[in-house]
Amino acid sequence: MTEGHRSGCPINLSLEVLGDRWSLIVIRDIIFGNRRHFRDLMTHSQEGIASNILATRLKTLLDEGIITRADDPTHKQKGIYSLTEKGIELLPVLAQLSAWGYKYLPVTEELGIRAKLLADGGPKLWAEFMDELREMHLGIKRKSKGPSVFAKLQAAYEAVVAKQKKK
């Protein structure tokens, strides 16, 4: 057995980092909601994450090198969380997980639209989105100058929400 771990199995080791109730939700909110501050992550979580749980998960994600934290130049006590390359490379995992949930579970239309678009777009769309996330979080200019995947996903979500409000 690997020291400090139940086993050296890659699935086990991944679950030791990401398998709790909240870590992937925090990563989801950073990726799809562009929530980069503690308060945004806490107050905009539809699942209602508690501040102590959020703080613990952010520390774990920082310790594992999935996100980084930098001081916010506009406010000395705030930090800005960014994905690392390791965090950005979780996008295909989230896309596959959301596609599975969309197919087999009772997802809501507004929260399922991104999953549908990611599943329909497949690995090509994921690569474009990861390229965009590298620009947003790492400052690396995008290779493709096509339309923003983030904006496309957000617009689709907002269209569904607007349609539901009219009902």
Image (cartoon, helix red, strand yellow):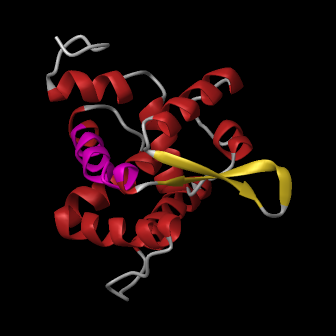
Q: Is 88 part of what is drawn in magenta?
A: yes
Is 6 drawn above or below residue 39 in the view shown?
Answer: above
Q: Residue at x 70, y 26 (%)?
A: 51
Instruction: Return the x and y of residue 162 as percentages of the image width and height.
Output: 58, 61
Is 107 drawn above or below residue 17 in the view shown?
Answer: below
Front in this rendered view, residue 6 or 143: 6
Apparent side of residue 93 relative to residue 74 in the rendered image (left or right): left
Where does the magenta region start and end? Answer: 86-100
Q: Residue at x 45, y 68 (%)?
A: 150
Q: Is 105 part of what is drawn in magenta?
A: no
Instruction: Return the x and y of residue 103 as percentages of the image width and height.
Output: 21, 40
Magenta residues: mostly which secondary structure? helix
Instruction: Return the x and y of residue 18 as percentages of the image width and height.
Output: 37, 30
Apparent side of residue 72 relative to residue 113 in the rendered image (left or right): right
Q: Residue at x 22, y 66 (%)?
A: 121
**Image quarter hosting the N terminus:** top left
Q: Residue at x 40, y 83 (%)?
A: 147
Apparent side of residue 144 relative to residue 159 in the rendered image (left or right): left
